[in-house]
Image (cartoon, coloured by chain):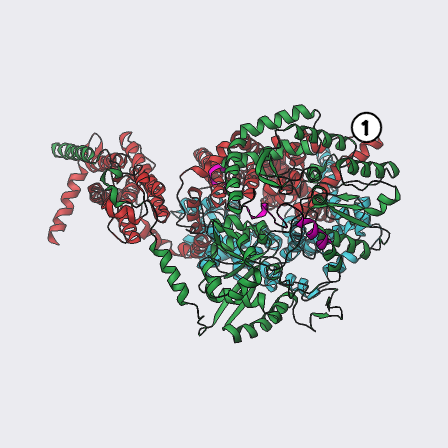
Amino acid sequence: MKIKKATSTIIFEIITYGLLAIGSLVCVFPFIIILSGSFTDNVTILTEGYSILPRNFTLSAYETIFRAPKDILQAYKMTLYYTVVGTAIGLIMITLTGYVISRREFKYRNQVSFLIYFTSIFGGGMIPWYLMYANVLNLKGSTFAIWFPALMSPFLIILMRTFIVGSVPEAITESAKIDGAGHFTIFAKIVMPVLGPGLATVGLFLALGYWNDWYRSSMFSTNSETWELQFYLYDLLNATTALKQMSQGTSISTAQLPTESVKLAMAVVATGPVLLLYPFVQKYFVSGITVGAVKG
Amino acid sequence: MKKVKRLVSILLVLTMVLALTGCGSKSAADSLDEAAITETAPEETTSAEETTETEAAELDTSERVDLVFYVMGDAPADEKMVEDAINEILLERVNATIDMQFSTWTDFQQKYSLELTAGSADLIYIANWLNYGQLATSGAFEELDGLLDTVAPALKETVGEANLNMCRVDGKIYAVPCAWAEYVCNGIKYREDLRVKYDLPVPDSLENFEAYLLGIKENDPNQGLLTVTTEESQGFLTAFDAAWIFNIKYPWVNTNGLPYGLASNYDTPADVYDYWYSDDFVEDMKLMKKWADLGFWSKSALSDTNNSESYKNGLCVAEIAGQNPNKQITALQDFKNDGHDDWQSEYLAYGEVTNTIYPGHATQNGTAIVRGCKNPERALKVLEILMTDEEVNRLVQYGIEGVHYEIDDQGIYHNLNSASPTFAYEGFNTWALRNGEFKLPQETDVVLNEMFDKYEKLGEQTKFPNVNIYNGFSENYDAYQAERTAVSNVMKQYLAPLQAGLVDDVDAAVAEFRQKMTDAGIEVCRDGFKEQWAAYCEEYGYK
Amino acid sequence: MEKSIKLLPRCNAILDKKLAGRKTGVFITAVVSLINIILSLPFFAWINVVNIPTLFPKLNITKDMATKLFQSYSIFNLLSFVQESNQGTIGLYAMILLVIMAAALYFNAAYLVKVVFNLKGSKGNLSLYATGRTAMFFEVILSLATFGYVIFSNGKFGMRGFQASPIVYIVTVLSLLSYLAVKIMEAEERKIYKEHGILKEVRKNWVLFVMLIPTFIYFMINNYLPMIGVYYAFTNFNFRDGLWASPFIGFKNFEFLIKADLFRLTRNTILYNLVFIGLGNILQIIFAILVSQVTVKWFKKTTQTLMFMPYFVSFVILKVLVYNIFEYQYGLINNIVTSMGGDRIDFYNTPSYWPVLITLFYLWKNIGYGMVVYLATIMGIDSEYYEAARVDGANIFQQIWYITLPLVKPTFIILLLYALGSIMKGQFELFYQMIGNNGVLYNITDIFDTYVYRITMTQPLSIGLGTAAGLYQSLFGFIIVVLVNFLVKRKNPEYALF
């Protein structure tokens, strides 16, 4: 049973589909270039530039990256570990905090919000932060130092607060309280179930943060066994520049440095898995009730 | 009511009284007895140190010490295996172990300073490109003068008094350099095969270099000529790589002259003159403009950073910035590996033209003990063993013989897994532990050594035979930090386009550049630099 | 014991007497506040330097240096002693004293203003008392810390070189008494408005406090304790003295900011950020609405995924792509232009193109990512609103205008407010990778972060410079956020950040 659509709806749909199609094309275009470049012979890239389809097709870039498959698999494993542990713990802490500072009956919610927000503006810089973990807590080399510092962020907490305020009307929690429900009950039975999109958003941001991080490995890892994937790749890249500069001053071997196509292949290796996983998270953003949809 | 008023007024009066008594803090100098002030720092502490040093002549190794050796770069796959082999020997000899820690190549400058700040390492790699001079002045390392005599006389002998003296900062030794001299003289790398093919001159002067490039352009208009960027031109000497070519014209004491647009010649280091404000400079910039207009490099070169593979893949026919003999060797190897057997690379050091050849400075590669190290004696002793014991030195530099490398009949080093080495040549990146006596030559070293021999002979004929004058100098710019940063910005904004030939009117652009430099306070920097430089030349007798 | 019981009502009686519409207690404490402020003025000595003839040689202070030193110091110029005498070890403590002093002054002044103008909040005098209590609290802390400072530095130097002046004793006693007085008055007021103090709150909402414990620990370790490093902005670091004892040099690290074209840098940074925040959010909302309206499932999923992709392109790779597109000789655009018979465009030597290009690439990279927040918000909207609107005959545009946008507004305002705090913090990676070392473009593409980065690169030991720059950025953002948040809060407290 179909209902005739209004003219305005038709116009709107044309605009929607048109704009989204153009937007997607623009966004995916560079990625296609990267993908094709990663399968192109290095000299071809340097002499002829980038193209949409690979020329002189070769897998040598991937062979270079996977030359030591054990190392890269270990890096994948560690990144997965950091992402899962960090996102799980972080999401719980962020949601709890967001819940507390969204409660009207909590007298100090503004003060707490301010104290959390304040950290996003003021900071002592990298050095004391590093010394805190490396010297005071003596965590250099541990995996804890890699996932702990990114557990929460003021941005995500405040985002979570907005989601909670937006999706849980005060009246509902008030009536639950009158029925004798405690905070943990309200949190688990009333807030969590309706927080789907919020949890998905914050969880996604947290997970992406972990997946894309290389900095904490750079700071705290003392052994390549604890390296994050992005650091593993980033360090390969940096070795090129560093050794190039250094060999200016002293005799060192600069063989085995990554080429253009290897750099592109790295980008593919690092982002591929996330893009494959993304559709699974996506259902929280697309499965809501759609406006203009006709219930049949 | 009244009570309150009275209370308030009493309180106010009280403060006023206090105000009057507390007011006007007097100068502290008033209460100082002149005799009570000593103008110089007390001497007792230093003499106390000396006595302890002499007592410690016999090293106490009763307690096991675990040392951390911080080096640059990435760890080799077989780090653990080689460390164990070294530690077995070290435990037996001096009851100590070492644990190599690697900076990795990501943010290594920053992490290096952090490591020194945190003070968790004992031994650390130093180099002038890691700002050894400034760090030593700032007190990042332990003084080694006394310790070397008492704990490690053999090390002192191996390295040599002259080399050690070059590591002096403010009169004190803070680092032990490596015991192997090398030449890193900058120059031009160019394509000999193309030069011969088109019958072009050897690029041994500005004119000939121009003729070489023009000749190739005429014969093959599609051939790229130079890939110059700003990559090799950070700092206070140049702002664009093309300007390195002027080393072929001037016999400067250092590649690209002195900072802040100053210059002095190798034969007369103390005689500093002005380059940026001279007519030579205008003339040079006009040449750059001419070359840029001829299309020697891309008009977008200032934003390009991707020059690493151009020469290797034949996209350019010469490299003029940041080159050295070792890079020539790499180029030769690359051509061979990539199947370009008909391509030939040739190398011409700028110093060959201007007669200013000198070896690398001692501070190029060295090892220091981090300030606050709990066992400096043991650390130095371990360093001595690492450098002067043939067995240990080979272990730390090349790994385990038979597992990681082998030596052939000619005594040449071969890695046993050259495809993906588990411990490469100098796999711990301990370039500072090189000892000429034990150093194993690689296949490519034959050509390299020929080049070094040639340079050594040339170097002997200079006024200061085989002495690297400039690189031992470290500037203290505390007094003019703000001006210095302003100068660095003007260089990027106004000097770079000049040197890249991107301006329409060179005279006007030079005038603007000079004006901006003056506004930025270049004079302050120059005065500060000249004063320190003069003192440095005086100290070492570079007249 | 008995005496104190008798004393309390008497106190109350005195404090409760009315005077010009205010309680006497308020007046007395306000006077104490005034005294505190007066005594904090620079010409009152809080700390005396004693035993100078033995102290100075011990600290290696020469005759020359001594002429710049005084026999007594207020909290204000105490740091000048640290600076002129080269005693970095006591610098951090002196700095902390100054910060407490600033806080105390602020609250004392606020208290005075509230008393004089008889400002009342929604709950009578409660906010007045809260201010007064805080002011006195900080004053007590300040005076105690001053005693601590004297003990600390005497311990450091191993002799009696410093002495607290009588003023400190007076301030301690007065403030302590006033604190108690305010407390007593506050307790009565609380009874009227059925408000409670922190202890009661903890007892009542202990579950909420428990929920906050992990967060508290996290922010303590990760943010608040390291914040002490702000002190580096005022020191000239060297390894010999270490992080906490390096010479204190006042505002010298900030000099380079003034030397630089601070106005231009600030302007560039703020303008770019405003454009990024404004355009970015608007486009994110538009695209989020568009995606939410798509009915074909596969199209919805695909477009959303594709638009998310640019987020994963690292800036290093972006730089290479950008260079290959805009290069003069063989760049993609110039190839197209010349094949159509046009003249080559010299992008890399023409600054005016770059603000547009940078903005485009920023948007390109961030729309898909930022869109997620708005999409989630829209998904959270109750479908009944739309049903009702449709029954009323609203078309799709009206539905968006009257339902979706108002409900997205809170999220938008929060994100906007949040972003304002970082208004002086530029997108470093974006600018650094796209512009790099190309000085020709600096005039309109140089932002604060790229400038500071270049400076710290030329100076290996520039811990102080970097921290000083960060402090400037933070202060700038902080002031703006506090102002805007205040305005937002007056209009609608629900939208405020804090």
Residue C20 lies in the magenta-colored region? no
The amino acid marked with disc number 1 is: Gly
In the image, which lettered chain appears red? C
Display colour for chain A: cyan
Give whichever of B35, C151 is nearer the camera: B35
In the image, which lettered chain appears green? B
* Residue stretch rendered in magenta on the structure: B451-480
Query: Where in the figure is residue A222, as x and y percent of width and height?
Result: 56, 62
The residue tagged 1 is: C342
Residue B454 lies in the magenta-colored region? yes
Query: Where in the figure is residue B85, as x and y percent of width and height?
Result: 60, 73
How many marks are shown on the rendered structure? Answer: 1
Query: Where in the figure is residue B241, as x and y percent of width and height?
Result: 69, 40
Q: Residue at x 71, y 25 (%)?
A: B504
Give whichever of C238, C305 is nearer the camera: C238
Tag 1's secondary structure?
loop
